Amino acid sequence: MQENLPKLTLVLGGAASGKSKYAETLCSIGGLLKVYVATAQVFDDEMSDKIAKHLIQRGPNWITIEAPIDVAGALAQAPDDAVILIDCATLWLTNVILGDHDLVAATEALLAGIAQCPHPIVIVSNEVGYGIVPENALSRRFRNAQGALNQTLATHADRVVAVMAGLPLTLKGDQ
């Protein structure tokens, strides 16, 4: 396992907070192969542009596995001597909810995949609970599900880091 990188690190933050960049930095310490598990799906030009910017930010030294729903399957595909970045749990949750998948079963599969994976894992997720109460039922359902997912991931994580304005604050585990 990578020095100073525990089995599971959760990196939380708001939109454009610097959480992905921070998570990528964590994965770059120690010389392991870097595997990026991408949960985003491209439905419009804005998302396409965002993904292109993330690819440039990461650079060419990453193996990318597309996994909008089956993150556990992606974890099982990772090569030996790798560190894995899952970016992000929020888009994964969006895919599960909008795809009308069983959220409980999908979350259990995600947690089982994480538990079975022999590699250090860093998961990026949005903290969405700081905003106002959403107006519509789907948005409220998503906000509540995201809060529950983050709490579940934080419970299983060895380290939890909040990132605001590009600055990390360790909430759980060693710095």
Image (cartoon, rainbow, N blue to C red):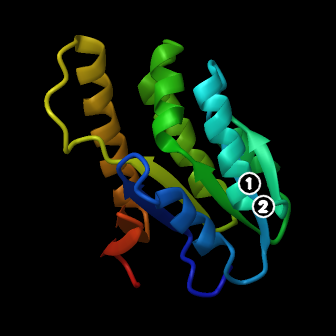
Q: Which residue is nearer to you in this view: 1 or 46?
A: 46
Picture quarter with the N terminus: bottom right
Tell me: residue 124, above or below residue 50.
below
Q: Any mark on residue 56, and which?
A: 1
Q: Which residue is nearer to you in this view: 143 or 119?
A: 143
Amino acid bearing label 2 = Gly
Residue that mark 2 sits on: 59
Q: Check disc 1: other Cα within 10 Å, few if <14, some if 14-19, many if 20+.
A: few
Which residue lies at the image location 81% right of the left edge and 72% below the top edge?
A: 81
Please state if 141 lies on the left or on the right of 94 as rendered. Answer: left
Which residue lies at the image location 25% right of the left edge and 31% below the top edge?
A: 144
Tell me: residue 117, above or below residue 48.
below
The answer to whether residue 113 of the structure is visible from this angle is yes
Please state if 106 lies on the left or on the right of 148 as rendered. Answer: right
Picture quarter with the C terminus: bottom left
Q: Any mark on residue 33, and which?
A: none
